[in-house]
């Protein structure tokens, strides 16, 4: 839900300074997310951290957390595969006259 106090009325335009401040804040937020991602990747290289995360994930799945179970299943390669079966019929249209083809198209419409 939006914070009503932060909404800008329809006709109001941001000043150049406000736009600049918003752009700088956006860059800083991206920088922080990148730093967090790099830190997580670095920590996950540690075997003890990997074991702790694995155990926590398994514990959550055992408690009935469906998302944790799905993550485990997908990670170990057991995700269900959606199978779609198609059939294809090839008809040599060169054997038909133009009138016959038109009639077939009219019947299908």
Image: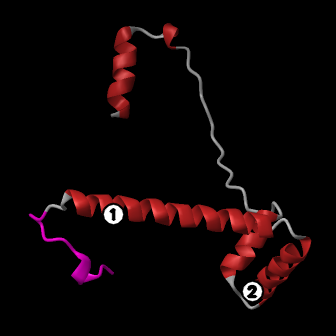
Q: Is residue 104 above or below residue 28?
A: above
Q: Quadrant of residue 54?
A: bottom right
Which badge, 2 or 1, is on the more N-terminal residue? 1
- Rendered residue at 72%/70% (across/down): 71
Q: Residue at x 40, y 65 (%)?
A: 25
Label 2 Cα neighbours within 10 Å, binned few <14 / some 14-19 / many ≥20: some
Q: Position of residue 38 (x, y in %)?
A: 69, 62
Q: Is residue 105 shown above or below 67?
A: above
- The residue drawn where x is 78% and y is 65% is 42
Report which residue position mark 2 lands on: 60
Whether residue 99 sits left or right of residue 27 in the image: it is left
Q: What stretch is highlighted in magenta?
A: 1-12
* Mark 2 element type: helix
Give whichever of 39, 109 is nearer the camera.
Answer: 39
Most foreground residue, 18 or 70: 18
Residue in the image at 79% along x and 70% along y: 43
Circle 1 residue: 22
Residue 16: image location, x then y, percent: 21, 56
Q: Where is residue 41 in the image (x, y as percent from the top left)?
A: 74, 64
User: Under tag 1, what secondary structure?
Assistant: helix
**Main secondary-structure element of the magenta-colored stretch:** loop
**Quadrant position of residue 46:** bottom right
Q: Going by the image, does 26 lie left or right of 51?
A: left
Residue furthest front in the image = 17
Q: Which mark is residue 66?
A: none
């Amino acid at each position: 839900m939006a914070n009503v106090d932060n909404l800008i009325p329809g006709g109001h335009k941001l000043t150049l300074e406000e736009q600049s401040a918003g752009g700088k804040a956006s860059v800083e937020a991206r920088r922080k997310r990148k730093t967090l991602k790099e830190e997580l990747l670095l920590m996950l290289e540690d075997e003890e951290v990997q074991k702790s995360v694995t155990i926590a994930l398994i514990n959550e799945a055992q408690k009935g957390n469906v998302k944790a179970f799905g993550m485990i299943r997908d990670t170990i390669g057991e995700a269900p595969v959606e199978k779609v079966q198609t059939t294809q019929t090839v008809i040599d249209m060169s054997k038909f006259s133009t009138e016959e083809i038109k009639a077939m198209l009219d019947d299908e419409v």
